[in-house]
Image (tube, grey):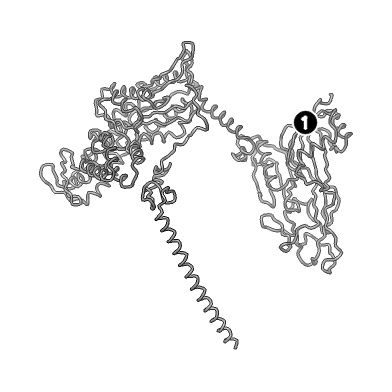
């Protein structure tokens, strides 16, 4: 077989690897090789050090190594029979001086003595497997080539321990020298041994007598080897003084032991059994994320993750083609479900393009109509996939004041058209079942939503989230007093408390009062809510909690996301149904807890029976009229929420009646079980679907803004952080310089001359006071010192 036309060199030196490619043997000489090796691996050595550089090769199948020290040796290597095109070269760098200690004739007048470095019977890092590197009793070290290197240490008697002895301080050797003494003067150590390398196929090679720069280098190479070979090891010892490991499979003979050489740093494999009798494993704990990150580039990791996600979940763009078939499967497995899809076809010859999708399963529709209050919270959240879009959701409230998902929709953005598409199908759910109830829609003041609700659901009332309203309010009218009065007005159950709070706001800031007066009072003030709904919620936290409950599903492909939502709701329905069946009382668990709390508060009230079903209840000096027959209290909390207030509770306790009889039926166990009495049936995996014929559905246009897409929403300064219930700032900051709100003295832009002068005068007074204190201290210090001196003199006398 003729030799290859071109060669590739893999050059190994102290764990470092360099590649030389496309080497023409007819144009390559020894000086070229020496120059390439020096440039690739030896550039960090100082010039003029007088190093001896050896380059050799061990071609496979030859059985001996070839020293490359001339053009002839290089040509002989190129023309070997069966020589591969990829060759491993090894580089060794040695000092021309042997490993010895300078021999002064005398040290401080004492003769130089040759002592045993193992006089204490122990050598650092030595055990039964380190025989090759044990110091003998003649003070000699046996080298690889059989030669003896004398080790002479001065100033030590035969009966004393040598300065070179074992230490348990994390594998560090004790030098025994004084501070400031230069260690190892004249001690020039060389260790001959093969350094770690990779073979022509790029695989890690471990051999007995192989040396490593330190213990970390050995551990890293051992980890690479076990991951590459696909087996798990047990580390019997994993210390700086030694590393011993064996194969995890019982009966497998593979074993390795390494420990440091006498310098305490360089590591060498002392014993090694490379044979394996076990099979390759699929899981290896050594191949953790840290190891992978070191081996692969960031872009490679990203592409690998993307391919894994596509393999497990499908690609984002490819799943849009399955949506028409998915709609058929939903209607087939869950009859009564409402799933609608819009698409665009700009040209007849173009494939249809996804527009919007609405999904509501039959189990969600039945549970909402049969067991929930006529209250719907709507909200939208941005999707995190490459095609963007917005996920709109509608949630209701069950009898336990928990969230009940009603419907979801994927739209291009939050605008009049997308909200119209969503609420049109919500209207279909409400009216198709003959439901004539006082519907209420709550939102976050989305743009254009008021007009859509008024057009599609004119009989429904529309609430705006008070928290979002307050964020807009405080941006224009900051201040702690305004903040407190705003929330008092929003949470007031009756007209009187609302008017009192609004009057205070008007006194504080007439513009702030005018801003709130322009808003429909029924959209944000609790006292003006429709009491037939039996819901006193002033924030849209329910819909926002649903978005947070979805978690990472918002970043999944569209079909994976819809199936994930279905599975979460399906499991939620059955879990809550089982919990409701186990209740032993007639009302839901959370309402039961609330009644216990209200009962404690009612003990502070005094109820007097007036006749019929009326009671006069005294609460903190204020009289409240309660009518148990008409379910009324002058505070109006009972009517709006449907749960007895503390005044009604006092009257009920006075009459010794069952308080559960005065709780609205929306909170009963029966209604709760009706809400969760239906189920969502599972759907076959998409691999088992029969794809409907027709033009494939293309994904929407790819919208990609500049920079990295944001996946975490910015939160306001006083908004609770994720996973916490406390706000970042509990009160409004007030500047002590200009007396304005919203900033502090350090960031104040108003600097008044009189205030600045006062601060300067105050600083001068402080410095003068400090000077007086120092003078007094020095005076008393001198007095005390003179007194002590006189006392000492008297004692000596």
Q: SS for tag 1?
A: strand
Q: Position of residue 774 (x, y in %)?
A: 50, 70
Along the line of sight, the residue nearer the viewer: 558 or 520 = 520
Visible residue check, residue 726: no
Q: Which of 343 and 780 is in front in this view?
A: 780
The answer, for residue 356, to whether it is visible in the render is: yes
Farthest residue, direction front: 753
Q: Quadrant of residue 404?
A: top left
Left or right? Give the position of 18 relative to 741.
right
Residue 174 % position (x, y): 71, 59
Vertical order, 337 against 378 (above or below): above
In the drawing, does residue 692 fall left or right of residue 517? right
- Figure label count: 1
Q: In this view, does 509 lie above or below 187?
A: above
* 556 on left or right of 602: right
Query: Residue placed farthest to the top in the image?
Result: 348
Q: Residues within 10 Å of mark 1 (few under 14, many from 20)?
A: some
Residue 425 percent location from the top left of the image: 34, 22
| Residue identified by numbered label 1 | 8
Q: Residue 470 vs residue 551: left or right?
A: left
């Amino acid at each position: 077989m003729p030799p290859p036309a071109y060669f590739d060199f893999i050059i190994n030196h102290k764990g470092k690897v360099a590649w030389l490619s496309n080497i023409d043997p007819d144009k390559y000489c020894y000086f070229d090789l020496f120059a390439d090796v020096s440039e690739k691996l030896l550039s960090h050595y100082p010039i003029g050090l007088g190093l001896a550089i050896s380059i050799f090769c061990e071609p496979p199948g030859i059985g001996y190594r070839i020293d490359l020290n001339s053009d002839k040796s290089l040509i002989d290597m190129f023309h070997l029979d069966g020589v591969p095109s990829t060759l491993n070269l090894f580089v060794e760098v040695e000092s021309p001086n042997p490993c010895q200690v300078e021999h002064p004739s005398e040290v401080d007048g004492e003769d130089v003595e040759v002592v045993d470095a193992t006089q204490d019977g122990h050598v650092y890092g030595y055990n039964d497997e380190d025989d090759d590197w044990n110091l003998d009793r003649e003070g000699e070290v046996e080298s690889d080539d059989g030669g003896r290197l004398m080790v002479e240490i001065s100033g030590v008697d035969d009966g004393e321990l040598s300065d070179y002895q074992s230490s348990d301080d994390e594998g560090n050797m004790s030098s025994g020298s004084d501070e400031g003494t230069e260690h190892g003067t004249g001690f020039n150590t060389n260790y001959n041994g093969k350094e770690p390398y990779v073979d022509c196929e790029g695989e890690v090679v471990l051999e007995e007598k192989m040396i490593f720069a330190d213990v970390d280098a050995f551990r890293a190479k051992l980890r690479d080897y076990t991951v590459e070979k696909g087996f798990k090891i047990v580390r019997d010892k994993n210390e700086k003084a030694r590393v011993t490991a064996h194969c995890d499979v019982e009966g497998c003979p593979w074993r390795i032991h390494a420990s440091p050489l006498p310098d305490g740093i360089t590591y060498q494999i002392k014993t090694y059994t490379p044979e394996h009798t076990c099979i390759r494993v699929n899981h290896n704990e050594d191949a953790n994320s840290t190891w992978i990150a070191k081996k692969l580039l960031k872009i490679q990791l990203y592409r690998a993750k993307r391919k894994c996600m596509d393999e497990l979940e499908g690609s984002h763009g490819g799943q849009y083609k399955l949506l028409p078939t998915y709609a058929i499967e939903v209607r087939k497995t869950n009859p009564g479900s409402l799933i609608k899809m819009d698409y665009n076809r700009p040209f007849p010859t173009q494939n249809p393009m996804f527009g919007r999708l609405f999904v509501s399963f039959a189990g969600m529709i039945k549970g909402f109509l049969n067991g929930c209050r006529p209250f719907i919270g709507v909200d939208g959240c941005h999707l995190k996939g490459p095609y963007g879009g917005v996920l709109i959701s509608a949630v209701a409230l069950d009898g336990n004041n928990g969230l009940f998902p009603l419907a979801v929709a994927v739209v291009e953005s939050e605008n009049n058209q997308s909200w119209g598409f969503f609420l049109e199908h919500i209207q279909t759910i409400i009216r198709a079942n003959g439901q004539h109830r006082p519907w209420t829609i709550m939102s976050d003041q989305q743009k254009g939503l008021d007009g859509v609700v008024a057009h599609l659901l004119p009989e429904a009332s529309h609430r705006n989230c008070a928290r979002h309203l307050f964020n807009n309010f405080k941006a224009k009218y900051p201040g702690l007093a305004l903040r407190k009065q705003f929330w008092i007005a929003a949470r007031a159950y009756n007209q009187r408390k609302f008017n009192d709070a609004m009057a205070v706001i008007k006194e504080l800031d007439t513009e702030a009062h005018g801003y709130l007066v322009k808003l429909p009072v029924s959209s944000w003030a609790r006292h003006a809510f429709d009491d037939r709904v039996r819901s006193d919620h002033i924030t849209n936290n329910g819909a926002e909690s649903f978005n947070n409950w979805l978690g990472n599903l918002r970043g999944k492909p569209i079909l994976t996301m819809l199936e994930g939502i279905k599975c979460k709701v399906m499991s939620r329905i059955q879990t809550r149904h089982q919990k409701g069946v186990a209740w032993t009382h007639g009302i839901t668990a959370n309402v039961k807890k609330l009644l216990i709390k209200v009962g404690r508060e009612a003990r502070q009230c005094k109820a007097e029976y007036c006749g019929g079903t009326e009671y006069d209840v005294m609460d903190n000096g204020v009289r409240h009229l309660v009518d148990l027959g008409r379910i009324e209290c002058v505070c109006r909390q009972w009517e709006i929420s449907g749960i007895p207030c503390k005044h009604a509770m006092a009257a009920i306790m006075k009459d010794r009646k069952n308080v559960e009889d005065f709780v609205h039926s929306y909170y009963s166990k029966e209604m709760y079980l009706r809400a969760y009495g239906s189920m969502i049936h599972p759907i076959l995996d998409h691999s088992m679907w029969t794809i409907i014929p027709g033009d494939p559905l293309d994904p929407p246009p790819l919208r990609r803004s500049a920079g990295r897409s944001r996946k975490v929403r910015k939160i306001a300064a006083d908004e609770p952080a994720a996973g916490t219930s406390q706000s970042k700032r509990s009160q409004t900051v007030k500047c002590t310089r200009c007396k304005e709100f919203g900033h502090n003295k350090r960031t104040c832009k108003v600097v008044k001359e009189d205030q600045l002068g006062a601060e300067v005068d105050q600083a001068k007074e402080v410095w003068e006071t400090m000077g007086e204190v120092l003078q007094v201290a020095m005076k008393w210090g001198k007095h005390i010192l003179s007194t002590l001196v006189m006392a000492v003199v008297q004692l000596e006398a």
